Image (tube, helix red, strand yellow):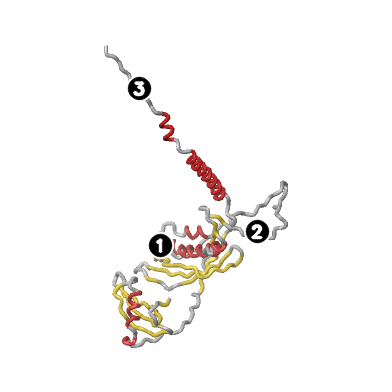
Amino acid sequence: MDDHHEEYERIPWSELTSAASPPRGRMLYVAAALVGAVVVGVVVGRTLDSPSPEAAAPETSIPAGGDEMAVDPTSTEPAPSTVTTSAGGGVYSEADLMAAPPTGPERVAAVRAEWFVYDYFTADLEPSGTADILGALPSGVELPLMPQDASESLSYVEWARAFRVDEVEEGLYRVGVLFRLLGAPPDRGFSRMGPRAVEVMVAVSADGGTTVVDLPSPIGLPAAPEPGPWPESVAPEEVPAEMIEAATAAVGAWGSEPRFVSGQPIDGGWRIVLTLADEVGNRWPVAVRFDSGGARIG
């Protein structure tokens, strides 16, 4: 049997304690710093949680059983203006709200009138025929025989734009619409017809619903203004080279192979006419204007 010899190591607790314990003065400094940090944190937290003076609403109270707010009778300050808050928490000023594009029943009526003109004057092979037109008109109306149901010719509305909206009475608007048709008789291809204008009567409900009240009413095209004549051209050698270069650079992104056609002096500058080629080789005349310093006008 082997003799067991057990060895015990002695841990110097007193030395470790004295080494790990900081001096008393240092402990006081650390404690003071911790207290100061707590105080600063409380002050900063209360500052962040409290609303700013500009955003804080004036205090009001509603007495029990009363219908009006009780306010301080000695206060002479006006009540703050109403603001709208966005979903992200931002506040829109009154100027921001006024800067929004105008909308309203006039715009709704204009959109519906354009839509109706597209449907009304498009006669193609759509199986629904006049269903879209009847859907826009008051229920129960009967249409005369329409090209959508009887004609072998085709027509498409190339474009339609409202140019005038007049309120006839509350909720009822007369909309002037300009449009142009592409038409194809049975024996040949499509051709572009001349522009036309009609008035469309549109009723608009409070929630933005629309009904076209009657069939389109033909009107004349709006009268065109009479601007002054174009300026007269001068000899090509009289046009400053820097003006031709500026015009060529200005239109380079629109087309290719710019070619100088003519130049006309205008008040304080020049009008330069060039032709530009598009992707299929058609050349289109364009005009650009510059002041005497080479800056583009308009």
Q: For the C terminus, which image quadrant?
A: bottom left
Residue kind at label 1, given as amino acid type: Asp
Q: Write the residue at 36% across / 68% down.
A: 190
Q: CA distance from mark 3 to mark 1?
A: 107 Å
Q: SS of the residue at dot 2?
A: loop
Q: Are marks 3 and 2 in contact (CB under 8 Å)?
A: no
Q: Is residue 112 above or below residue 2?
A: below
The mark total stands at 3
Image coordinates of residue 267 in percent, x first then y, are 43, 84
147 is higher (above) or lower (below) than 1: below
Q: From the image, state whether disc 3 or disc 1 is nearer to you.
A: 3
Q: Which residue is mark 1?
A: 124
Q: Residues within 10 Å of mark 3 (few under 14, many from 20)?
A: few
Of helix, strand and loop, which one carries label 1? loop
Whole-percent x and y of residue 60? 67, 52
244 relative to 109 in the view: left or right: left
What is the distance, in whole Å, between disc 3 and disc 2 at their CAs?
A: 84 Å
Q: Which residue is mark 3?
A: 8
State left or right for residue 36 relative to residue 182.
right
**Gap between marks 2 and 1 measured at Cα:** 62 Å
Instruction: Give the image quarter of residue 294.
Output: bottom left
Q: Earlier in the sequence, mark 2 or mark 1?
A: 2
Question: Residue 297, how many percent across, how many down?
Answer: 42, 77
What is the crowding at mark 2: few (fewer than 14 residues within 10 Å), some, or many (at least 20)?
Answer: few
Dot 2 amino acid type: Ala
Q: Earlier in the sequence, mark 3 or mark 1?
A: 3
Q: Quick one: 91 or 236, which is closer to the camera?
A: 91
Mark 3 residue type: Tyr
